């Protein structure tokens, strides 16, 4: 087992502070320091960088990020039981770790960064992971405040994030949103046995980088057209898009898209074209 610092082993930390995992908070902890170091470095070297981590828990990944030489790590944790363990890490790395207690869904990291760019690295709680991802990708300003995201998801969710139209069973709304604004890849899988307690399914590490110049588009229109199309994915678009725009045939023809195509047949760029054509037609 790798030795990355002189803090107590994580199993001991969990015992000392009574951190029995709570299912309601999506708690599956990582104790293997080789693995946490691999995740921390998966998005590139961290020396001198600012990082945001959601859900540090007892601090396994937190310690790996700090050991990788970051300038600043801001962690947001909802479970107050974890705070003493995190404080111990903060004392070991003076001035490097900022601990925020609260719900990441209600905290805007931009307010904590004073304009500094940051990387996001997190083993996300499975119950709020996709909402957090969607919020970060929907950032009003672009390029966004985050330089990259290295995130753990259940493998099946990871596949839905990175899919394109060649992967029909996973391609959907999440892939359209992420594919529009980011380049997303699965880096590696993590087996259930790596976690305490082990989840039922395999997890994957996803890496997302913001596209510097995504096609211009209203995010509301893009989400609405993707929702209508994938809401009835087996139907032809001229039928499924009627709830989005009454004369769906006209919309599709104006956007240069085959009206008999289905949701999973057309690429992300076609969704952007549909959203923009919709905005033009409704003026
Ligand atoms: N980073 C740790 C690790 O890898 O061992 C723990 C990861 S565990 C999957 C998810 C963590 O997110 C837990 O510590 C949980 O308490 C925290 N959490 C759950 N919901 C949260 C929320 N809405 N905001 C912030 N943290 C949350």
Image (spheres, rainbow, N blue to C red):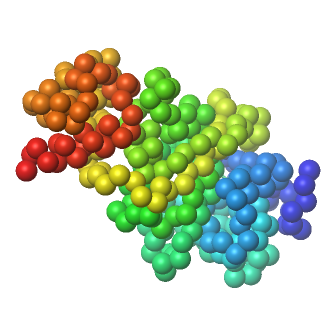
At a point 20% along the width and 31% down the height, the residue shown is 252
Foreground residue among 159 and 260: 260
Residue at the far front in the pictured view:
256
Q: Position of residue 127 (x, y in %)?
A: 50, 43
Classify 121 as above or below 69.
Answer: above
Q: Is residue 108 above or below residue 255?
A: below
| Left-right relation of 79 to 34 | left
Number of numbered callouts drawn: 0
Give the image quarter of residue 137: bottom left
Would you say 202 lies left or right of 158 here? right
**Residue 247 at x, y = what percent?**
9, 30
Near-viewer residue (81 or 129): 129
Residue found at x 77% / y 51%: 38
Residue in the picture at 12% in, 30% down = 250
Looking at the image, is 91 positioned above or below residue 232? Answer: below
Instruction: State left or right for residue 250 relative to residue 204.
Output: left
Q: Which residue is drawn at 52% across and 64% down?
A: 146
Counting from the top left corner in percent of width and height, residue 99 is at 61, 71
Report whether residue 14 is seen.
Answer: no
Q: Residue 187's quadrant in the figure? A: top right
For residue 261, above or below residue 110: above
Camera sees residue 265: yes
Q: Which residue is at the front of the view, 48 or 97?
A: 48
Q: In which quarter of the image is residue 81?
A: bottom right
Residue 59, how many percent across, how many down? 72, 60
């Amino acid at each position: 087992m790798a030795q990355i610092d002189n803090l107590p082993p994580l199993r001991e930390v969990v015992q000392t502070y009574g951190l029995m995992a709570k299912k309601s908070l999506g708690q599956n902890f990582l104790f293997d320091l080789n693995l946490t170091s691999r995740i921390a470095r998966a998005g590139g070297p961290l020396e001198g960088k600012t990082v945001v981590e959601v859900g540090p828990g007892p601090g396994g990944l937190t310690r790996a990020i700090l050991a990788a030489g970051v300038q600043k790590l801001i962690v947001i944790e909802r479970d107050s039981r974890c705070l003493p363990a995190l404080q111990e890490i903060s004392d070991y790395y003076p001035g490097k770790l900022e601990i925020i207690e609260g719900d990441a869904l209600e905290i805007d990291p931009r307010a904590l960064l004073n304009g500094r760019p940051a990387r996001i690295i997190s083993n996300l709680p499975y119950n709020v992971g996709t909402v957090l991802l969607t919020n970060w990708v929907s950032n009003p300003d672009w390029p966004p405040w985050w330089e990259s995201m290295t995130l753990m998801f259940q493998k099946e969710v990871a596949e839905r994030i990175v899919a394109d139209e060649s992967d029909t069973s996973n391609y959907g709304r999440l892939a359209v949103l992420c594919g529009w604004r980011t380049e997303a890849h699965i880096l590696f899988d993590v087996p259930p046995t790596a976690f305490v307690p082990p989840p039922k399914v395999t997890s994957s590490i996803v890496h997302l980088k913001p596209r510097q110049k995504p096609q211009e588009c209203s995010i509301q229109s893009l989400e609405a057209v993707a929702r209508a199309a994938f809401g009835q994915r087996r139907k032809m678009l001229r039928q499924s898009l009627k709830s989005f725009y009454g004369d769906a045939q006209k919309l599709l023809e104006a956007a240069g898209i085959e009206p008999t195509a289905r949701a999973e047949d057309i690429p992300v760029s076609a969704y952007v074209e549909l959203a923009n054509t919709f905005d033009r037609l409704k003026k």
